[in-house]
Image (cartoon, helix red, strand yellow):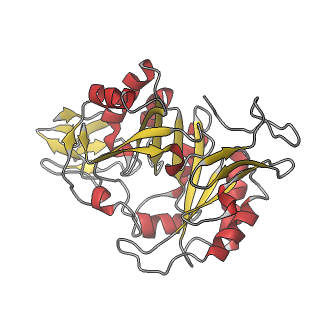
Amino acid sequence: MLEALYYEIDDQGITCLLCPKNCIITEGKTGFCRTRKNSGGKLYVLNYAACSSYALDPIEKKPLYHFYPGKQILSLGTWGCNFSCQFCQNWQLAQAEPQTMYVSPERAVVMAQQAGKDNIGIAFTYSEPNVWYEYVLDTARLANREGLKTVLVTNGFINNNPLKNLLPYVDAMNIDLKAFSDAYYQRICAGKLDNVKQTVERASRYCHVEVTTLLVPGLNDSTKEIEALAKWLGSVNHNIPLHFSRYYPNHRMGIPPTPVATLEKSYQIARRYLNYVYLGNVESRFSNTYCPACAALLLERTHTIISYLTQDKTCPNCGRASDISFF
């Protein structure tokens, strides 16, 4: 086992300082995420290099729509999470202990290099990468030296110091903003809204950021809440893409799926404050990218990516820059 970063020892035991839960962990016990254990008065990582799943995914699947569209990325996941979302789509990884294989940081980089010319790097996804922190940091450093991109698909629930020390090696993040209500975060996810907002604000100053909100009928999809969310995100940066994703029953939540009309209404509200809004988990023209200035179609997303941008990546109609990263 590897000794963990970010903890302190006091009379009560060990306080883990990786995420805002700041778990106090006594001898022989683990914290909320189950990946860190107090053994002999030191905190050890239980999932270092423990890979539960991997695949070569389209970058759009993360979802990242403005970060090298049409490319692929090697996606790695582990087990454990510092949330316990009732609707978790990957609960078999986040809330259980699946079988794993050992993938060293060096091996992960080689896998990415051998994945083909369309692969841009490594994404840490499927489960929460923040509870894989030491491995993600080591691997991202190596990937950075080899010219590979590093992507995090995360709930954004991390303390400032660990985030600050990881960000220099991260190229893009998709951050789940579960709702714009602290009551929802505490009741449905066992988290806190303000900490996630801080991560969005800090990360957006260092790397490419996109935000995803899963809309759950009757819980986080009110007009008032959607407007507050979009208005706040627009105040951070009105070019941050916001993805509204359609909820389907999963794990411990049996509410019926989100109506498409709710998604489309949320899209219209958010577009008042943001240049780029997308709908996910549903077939819709709102998965395309349109020019915020003249509404011309820039990128069409069907089974492939069709670009209508000019050679210098501007709008073919009005000449506005596309706000999209390309190789």
Q: Which residue appears at 44% of the width and 23% of the height?
A: 144
Q: Quadrant of the N terminus?
A: top left
Q: Quadrant of residue 69?
A: top right
Q: Which residue appears at 20% of the width and 33% of the height?
A: 2
Is the residue 86 above or below the residue 3 in the image?
Answer: below
How many numbered marks appear?
0
Looking at the picture, how far across and down is residue 219, in whole percent? 54, 75
Looking at the picture, how far across and down is residue 264, in whole percent? 69, 69
Looking at the picture, how far across and down is residue 111, in whole percent? 32, 31
Work out whether residue 206 or residue 301 is closer to the camera in this orientation and state it: 301
Q: Quadrant of residue 17?
A: top left
Q: Is residue 140 visible?
A: yes
Q: Quadrant of the C terminus?
A: top right
Work out whether residue 122 or residue 79 is closer to the camera in this orientation and state it: 122
Q: Which residue appears at 68% of the width and 54% of the height?
A: 288
Looking at the picture, how far across and down is residue 120, in whole percent? 48, 32
Q: Is residue 45 visible?
A: no
161 relative position to 127: left or right: right
Residue found at the very far top of the displayed protein:
145
Q: Which residue appears at 35% of the width and 60% of the height?
A: 90
Work out whether residue 19 or residue 111 is closer to the camera in this orientation and state it: 111
